[in-house]
Image (tube, helix red, strand yellow):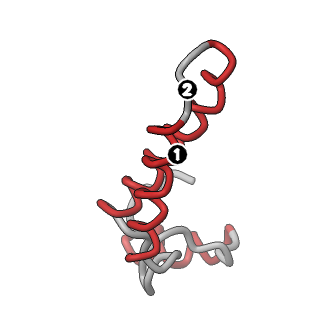
Amino acid sequence: MSSTLAKIVEIEAGMAQTQKDKATAYHLGLLKARLAKLRRELITPKGGGGSGPGEGFDGGCSPRKHLEQCCIRNQGWCEI
């Protein structure tokens, strides 16, 4: 986290030193975007990707398995 803070301070210092005119507008826009990204990371740090067990899409579900698990078990109408 301290490296993120150091990057934010470094970018802000660079923005303060940069002359503001048409020639540097694109560069300042890139710095602002990078600064916003770093601030967002400070507020919501990246979590460990993926969902835990029992959550998300079951990728190995065949139509037959779907019928067995959902329709027959529930003994009702099944919409695939």
Circle 2 — which element?
A: loop
Whole-percent x, y for residue 51 in the image: 47, 76
Task: From the viewer's perspective, tell me whether residue 50 is left or right of residue 6.
Answer: right
Q: Residues within 10 Å of mark 1 (few under 14, many from 20)?
A: few
Q: Residue furthest bottom?
A: 53
Q: Residue at x 52, y 75 (%)?
A: 49
Task: From the viewer's perspective, tell me whether residue 79 is left or right of residue 62.
Answer: left
Quick one: 69 or 41, which is closer to the camera? 41
Q: Residues within 10 Å of mark 2 (few under 14, many from 20)?
A: few
Image height of 23 relative to 43, above or below: above
Q: What distance separates the C-alpha of mark 2 from that of mark 1?
A: 10 Å
Q: Residue at x 43, y 45 (%)?
A: 36
Q: Residue at x 46, y 74 (%)?
A: 3
CB-based contact (under 8 Å), mark 2 and mark 1: no
Q: How many marks?
A: 2
Residue pointed to by mark 2: 19
Circle 1 — which element?
A: helix
Image height of 37 relative to 32, above or below: below
The amino acid at mark 1 is Gly
The amino acid at mark 2 is Gln
Whole-percent x, y for residue 28 in the image: 56, 31
Residue pointed to by mark 1: 14
Image height of 63 relative to 25, above or below: below
Q: Which mark is residue 52?
A: none
Whole-percent x, y for residue 62 in the image: 70, 72
Q: Earlier in the sequence, mark 2 or mark 1?
A: 1
Quick one: 68 or 61, which is closer to the camera? 61
Whole-percent x, y for residue 30 in the image: 60, 37
